[in-house]
Amino acid sequence: MSKNTKRYALIMSALLAGAASFGQAKLMEMTLGHATTPVAGNGFGPRTSNHVVFFDKDRLDNGNFNAQGNNPDAITAPYISATISLANQQFTGLTYGAGTTNLSGSSNAVPNGLVFGAGPSQATGTAPGNPNVQQASPLNSYDLFGAFGNSWGPRNGMFMSDAGATPVAGSYPAQSGTGIDAEGLLPGAANDANGGVSVFTCAQVMADLGRTHNAATRHYYGDLVVSFSRFVQNPVIHIAGLGGSYRYCPTALDPSNTANWISTFFTTELELVGGYPMTRMAGNQFFDLSGNLIVNNNTATPNGESTDQGVPAPGQFNNYGAASGSVRINQTVRFLRFRVYLRGATGSQFNWSAPGSAVNGGTRDPLTGDIWFISASLKQEQLIPLPATGMQLNAALSGNDVQLNWKTASEINTKEFQIERSSDGVNFSVIGTKAAMGNSVVESSYAHTDLNMQAPVYYYRLRLLDEDGSYKFSNIAVVRKAGSIKGVRVFPNPAISNMSVEFSNVKGEYLISLYNMGGQEVSSQRAIVQYNVQYVNVNRNNLPAGTYIMKVRNTENGESFSQKVTLQ
């Protein structure tokens, strides 16, 4: 979306005592009052750090919103969270705006191809203090979902909040959706309006790299990941403002003649990874699905705004051509990963940017890009109950005793924890039990002491029993006696997601590499080991299932360790 901000949002929601306690279906949405980052006037600027977003009760209250702004069914405590992050960035180390700051003291720098809270700028030679500097316009990275463009932004009717509703065939305004207050126009507190996370796809890097600009070529930028703290069914994802443009009139030409204005157009597209089916719930005429792609079907002028304003006045954007709408993910998921692409358009007069002379004198060297927003909705009954969430076991040696500590973020119908121990990491036996809270929506802490450690190494895990007899395991925590074992160990193997490398009494600097069976290096990372026992996480990233060779090499003395590992 090329004009103001929209922000990419994710999910937190309220969970009652269990699935059986759910009464009338409640819609849960991301509202302005439940952001972890400032909203109004913060000049937050470009950022790549994660967003955590909480879900609250739908402001519309299923059509019964109170005119005084009171929502009697409002969910008052968030019991589920979602983290929105950027991953696998393809364009890093960018220097746009490096060393510049905005009025709030935040940096204007755009270090990667994808950032939160940024917008394009004109960067003319007459800009005070910053002649010819390509820097982003700092924007709120979390804002009103329809904040950009004022009257040109997306409309409430372009979105559908209820996953169980009948999808709207056609487009706004002929047939509109329901359930979103993107415009912040309904009565009541402004904080109850729908919020979103803004993402900036920097088009300038395409110009600088000389990449192809046409409607048939997609350029991969990286991934946007939505991580829920528990499984959810059929979440609805809202996207606003896919499409950007840059437009100016060279100094030598008459700006009152609209024919003299030069334009270029481009748009972000999102590909859902994992093969989950999607359903288009609502949207404007440009919002469309193509298999697992969320696209702007306007191949000629995928401009920066969602609402038709007709013929623009001289010097204004043609604010018409951005894609905005809602899709339902037809799957039970914990994670959603979207590959982010940028493509050009047919008939554009420039590539990805339009440097040149400015109307007000000087030289224009803009930082171009597409601003778009992401948000989400759930139904309360879509939350999948778990015996406990956030269970994490920690173990540490104290003298010759082992101190075990763990916490749960919430519990539903839990009975007890069985503390299990192993000396080989394979065969576990129960060494104690601890009564569980039963039902809790707040963080609970537990502790246990295992006296007089006898073996060189112990492995611990928790088995959490539910009242109905079901159970789940915690992570495995490892404790070693100091100086008992030297070397390197890789676990788990096979691995479903990430692996860990255990360094025992081998301090130094290491290079950890994975090679496929053809001998090609597919990932590499450095690690500095400073402690007697230290664990380094090896991220799987996007590697497919298969067999690999992990090589760990000490960069100081050349000693190495190799092991065959399997990713499932």
Image (cartoon, helix red, strand yellow):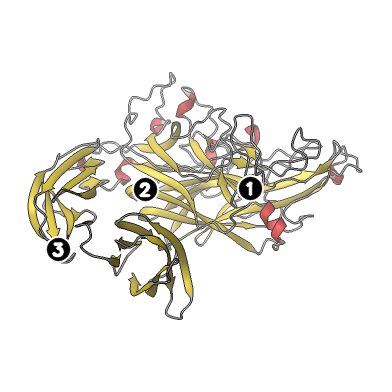
Which residue is situated farthest in the top direction here?
68
For badge 2, the amino acid type reads: Phe
Q: Nearer the viewer, mark 2 or mark 3?
A: 3
Asked which quadrant contains residue 153, the reply is top right
For badge 3, the amino acid type reads: Ser
Residue drawn at 26 percent across, 46 percent down? 389
Q: Residues within 10 Å of mark 3 (few under 14, many from 20)?
A: some
The x, y position of residue 424, in whole percent, is: 16, 66
Callout 3 secondary element: loop
C-alpha separation, residue under disc 1 versus residue under disc 3: 55 Å
> Earlier along the polypeptide chain: callout 2 or callout 1?
2
C-alpha separation, residue under disc 2 versus residue under disc 3: 34 Å
Q: Residues within 10 Å of mark 1 (few under 14, many from 20)?
A: many
For badge 1, the amino acid type reads: Asp
The x, y position of residue 62, in whole percent, is: 39, 33
Q: Residues within 10 Å of mark 2 (few under 14, many from 20)?
A: many
Does 255 sit above or below residue 210? above
Residue ID for mark 1: 370
C-alpha separation, residue under disc 2 versus residue under disc 1: 26 Å
Residue drawn at 39 percent across, 55 percent down? 330
Report the side of 403 relative to 536 (left or right).
Answer: left
Report the side of 510 relative to 535 (left or right).
Answer: right
Residue ID for mark 2: 228
Asked which quadrant contains residue 207, the reply is bottom right
Looking at the figure, which quarter contains the C terminus?
Answer: bottom left
Looking at the figure, which quarter contains the N terminus?
Answer: top right
Does 484 sit above or below residue 62? below
Residue 448 seen in the figure: yes
Q: Nearer the viewer, mark 1 or mark 3?
A: 3
